[in-house]
Image: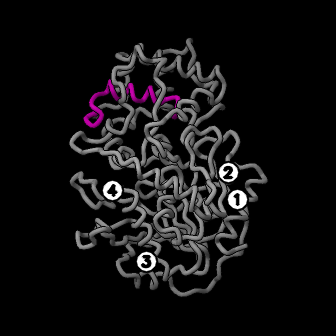
Amino acid sequence: MSRWFRRLLVGAAAPVLALTTLTAVPAAAAEEPDVRAALDAVPGLTVTAERPAAPGFRFFELSLRQPVDHHHPEAGTFQQRLTLLHRAADRPTVLATGGYNLPSGQGRAEPTTLLDGNQLTTEQRFFGTSLPSTTGDYRTLDIWQAATDHHRIVEALRSVYPGRWISTGGSKGGMASVYHRRFYPDDVAGTVAYGAPNNVNDREDSAYRDFLASVGTPECRAALHAVQRRALLHREEFTARYTAAYPGAAFGLIGSADKAFEIGVLRTPFTFWQSIGQAGCPSVPGPEATDQQLYDWLDRTGRLAVYTDAFATDFIPYFYQLGTQMGYFGLETDHLADLVRYPGATEPRSFVPREVELRFQPQAMRDIDRWVRLRGERLLFVQGAADPSVAEPFRLGPGTRDSLSLWAPGATHSARIASLTEADRATAATTLARWAGLA
């Protein structure tokens, strides 16, 4: 899955892999027991491959047998894919998730780099090849089942990595890390969640609308609105360009190229501020731009390709989760009211087959939010101050202990510890090292 597609979704997934090393820690021990033998001894775990890795590391592709339904282990199993970047058995271990299918490559998450640790990266149930069902039956796709997958991973690998564990993830992956902690708070010593939305009340989306009405400069917001109007005023011509740009593309899931185009246009301001930000305002097409220039900009910024079946069908499980438990954001369309043909088309229902029931469970996110505020412990939230994905962030409360919520000035959905102010960066790195037992 491409990085820009993950960024589109709800914040859907800022990449969990970091690019910056902030501190150095002692190198791993040169001699240790053979990790391959230790992995082979774990019940239910299969080493499917070992790949070449950077000096000082070993890289394994793994598969762990998991119950389809943790409430009913006798109901069958599936294979959950994992990767392991092994540093040393006596180093901290980072449990990393991007929230979707297993990322390719061997990149290290920012906490892994900071701690010079091992990294276990997970594929989420119903994504990639980690499929409890191939028939479109998503009844075992909920936050508790996924959290229990993570719990069993930690239990299975604890014999190989007995030291402290840290969990982390970006956007949906960060949300998954928090959900894991709510149900199994003692599995890891701390959690670093990047750009994680907290849609605690799915019926109340004013925070997102207010954010998009105030972010950046008035001139830039007006230019984005003008682009949207022009695109919908010329929708027949632009939809023809859309279908020509992706020959053979089908739109069976969403319903039509016209509807898919409208969704892309309506979401464009959100995706612009989420991934580009104020620095991209000079590139927003003005009245002098040609139709082709405007379409090309829309295609890139609105990510029109993702609404074709070739992309969208892979993310049915994600939108199912949004429509049943995690919630979604609403968009302001008053300035386009005379041009919108498909009211409500940006909601999760458009991205899930009609025969699949979506029954929303409002108590799910309320429970998570209550736990964070009243019982959460050792949580580090890192957010970009210019990121609309976290217009509704997780908030610390009177019962939250040893936790931080830090904001990177001007940063978008790709905010990391490295994006923070110098003082906050030092605080975050020191806190993380303490949690990992390296202080």
Label for residue 141?
4
Tag 3 and tag 2, C-beta contact below 8 Å = no
Q: CA distance from mark 1 to mark 4?
A: 33 Å
Element type where label 3 sits in the image: helix
Q: Is residue 253 magenta?
A: yes
Q: CA distance from mark 4 to mark 3?
A: 21 Å
Separation (CA) of disc 3 from disc 1: 29 Å
Per the rendered image, the range of residues in magenta is 251-271
Seen at 49% across and 70% down, the residue is 84
Going by the numbered disc 2, the residue's amino acid type is: Leu
Amino acid type for the residue under numbered disc 4 = Leu
Q: Which mark is residue 406?
A: 2
Q: Nearer the viewer, mark 3 or mark 2?
A: 2
Q: Earlier in the sequence, mark 1 or mark 4?
A: 4
C-alpha separation, residue under disc 2 versus residue under disc 4: 31 Å
State the mark number for residue 428: 1
Contact, mark 2 vs mark 4 (Cβ under 8 Å): no
Left or right of 328? Residue 225 is right
> Circle 4: is it few (<14), some (14-19), or many (20+) Cα within 10 Å?
many
Residue 3: x %, y % from top left: 49, 47
Quadrant of residue 273 within the rendered picture: top right
Question: Which of pointers 2 and 4 lies earlier in the amino acid sequence?
Answer: 4
Q: Position of residue 20 (x, y in %)?
A: 67, 56
Q: Amino acid at mark 1?
A: Ala
CB within 8 Å, label 3 to label 1: no
Q: Few, some or many C-alpha atoms within 10 Å of disc 2 (few <14, some 14-19, many ≥20)?
A: many
Task: Specify the farthest residue to the right.
Answer: 423
Assess whether mark 2 and mark 1 are in contact (beta carbons under 8 angstroms).
yes
Percent x, y of residue 311:
35, 42
Coloration mode: one colour
> Quick one: SS at disc 4?
loop
